[in-house]
Amino acid sequence: MKKVLLINPPFNIAKANYDSSISVGLLSIAIYLDSKNIPVKIIDGARQKNYLDLIKQEAPHCAWAGLSVMTTQIPGALQISQLIKEINPDCEIIWGGTHPTFFPEQTISNSLIDIVNFGEGEEVLHEIASGQELSQVKGIAYKRGGKIKINQRHELHDPAKMPLFNWDLIEREVLENLSLIPSLTSRGCPHRCTFCINAILKNKWRPRTVEQVLSDLTIIKSKPYFAGKKLRFWDENFFVDIERAKAINEGMISRNLIIPWETTVRANYLRQGLIDDNFLAKMKQSGCYLLSFGAESGSQRILEKIQKDISPEEIIESARMCLRHDIIPQYSFMIGLPGETRQDMMMTLRLIDQLVKLSDKVQILGPQTFRPYPGSVLYDECLQAGLPDEASAKAGWQAPQSLEEWSHLVQNELNYLAVKNFPWVADKDFVESMEAYVRFGAHSIKSAMGSSVKAQKLLKLGFVLLCQARWKLKFFAWPIEFKLAKKYAANADISKIN
């Protein structure tokens, strides 16, 4: 039977460390194809240094090569697609993942790509590999007679119909190097946050059964290469069905499946009593050590603008409740949204200040720069945005018009897009530098020095002390040391400061 090669391309920052986890989406597709007796092979360009040699070995024997592509993976994905076409011109190149899902027509316009899978990929890849006529396969774009064809969207996949995780489909070297075991108990989210991929794509919440989750954990506990490692439930929202979440938690305790684990949750679930102190105590007993919250902003106006449906007060209360049970509360923030004022951003910084003063255990991610995704109200607002005081007076932001343009734009950028490309952000230096000033200034010196960003100790200490002073004074003008540190980090080591 014809073989499917699934590839996770490298990210554009080649020196970065991606061993914290793996692509659960790609693994899920591989598991589904394997359960249908379709030969499948996964190659991970982000974690296997010899990925190009592996591709050269496998390319002559595969009929389809499926690449899961985020925007920052485009340069590597184009290189891989070109390589496969040179080795095996008959191999059909299929791009899926977030970028092709948002830009299907633009992606399929590239001469290297034969099919674009927008949306989830398990059933789509199975139908293609089973020989189904492309015109009958939902969720794809393809070329026929020199014209681009875009089929209707595929129905959302039911995770409860998925087989259990088959870790044998991942190379042993990748699994042994993982610092965080990935798991997934549900897909999608029922909430309406305007910036979120799930809300934009209308990915409704769909759970796996309690028994499936516990069976997966039983398998994980049996693997010697996972011994002593922590686990992450990569759900968008683990606690949508509280009774289901409690049943999973109880099952972990009763079946001795206790393992250090973390997952995502909404702040209002705690304050509104859906997750109370009794449940938090049980979660701690089963191994929960960290809960990750999407706080996003300290400005109620911005929280309402993005339809987050939480309040700063609920965020603070969620931290207090977690800390009572020795569970690390982790909060992600973003700034630089269209229409966001400097006052709104300072409210976010004040909320971060309140959180970190509660305990050294509180973790802050960001604030990262908001980046627009097509299909949202915010994206449309960005397209119309422009700075009225600019002499050039461009009509607004325009997304790149080809994969080559995207590839050039994200070169050496760690994130989806750089702040410099956003006309709706007035104070670009402030927005771009803030993640560094929070990381190194808001927390204790000991915590900041323990950051994963590598640099000579004295240089790092000097930068940390400057960040600490800026944070204390809330003075962020002329971030010269940030720009120097960013340049140093980009040229010298694994991570950028932002």
Image: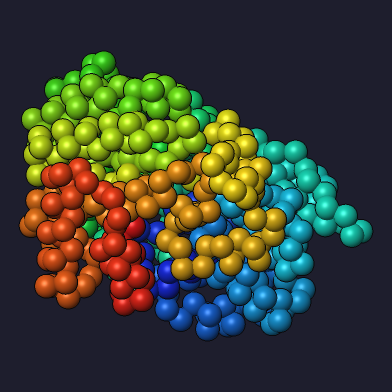
Along the viewing direction, whichever of 382 and 162 lies nearer the viewer: 382
Along the viewing direction, whichever of 21 and 198 lies nearer the viewer: 198
User: Residue 446, position in %: x, y?
Assistant: 7, 57
Query: For this view, does 123 lie left or right of residue 243?
Result: right
Quarter occupied by the N terminus? bottom right
Q: Residue at x 37, y 41 (%)?
A: 334
Q: Residue at x 38, y 26 (%)?
A: 303
User: Residue 127, position in %: x, y?
Assistant: 70, 50
Q: Considering only vertical position in the picture, is 237 above or below 99? A: above
Q: Is residue 223 visible?
A: no
Query: For this view, does 395 lie left or right of residue 326?
Result: right
Along the viewing direction, whichever of 241 and 79 lies nearer the viewer: 79
Q: Considering only vertical position in the picture, is 195 above or below 87? A: above
Quarter occupied by the C terminus? bottom left
Indicate how the structure is coloured in the image: rainbow
User: Residue 13, position in %: x, y?
Assistant: 43, 69
Q: Residue at x 52, y 62 (%)?
A: 410
Q: Quadrant of residue 92?
A: bottom right
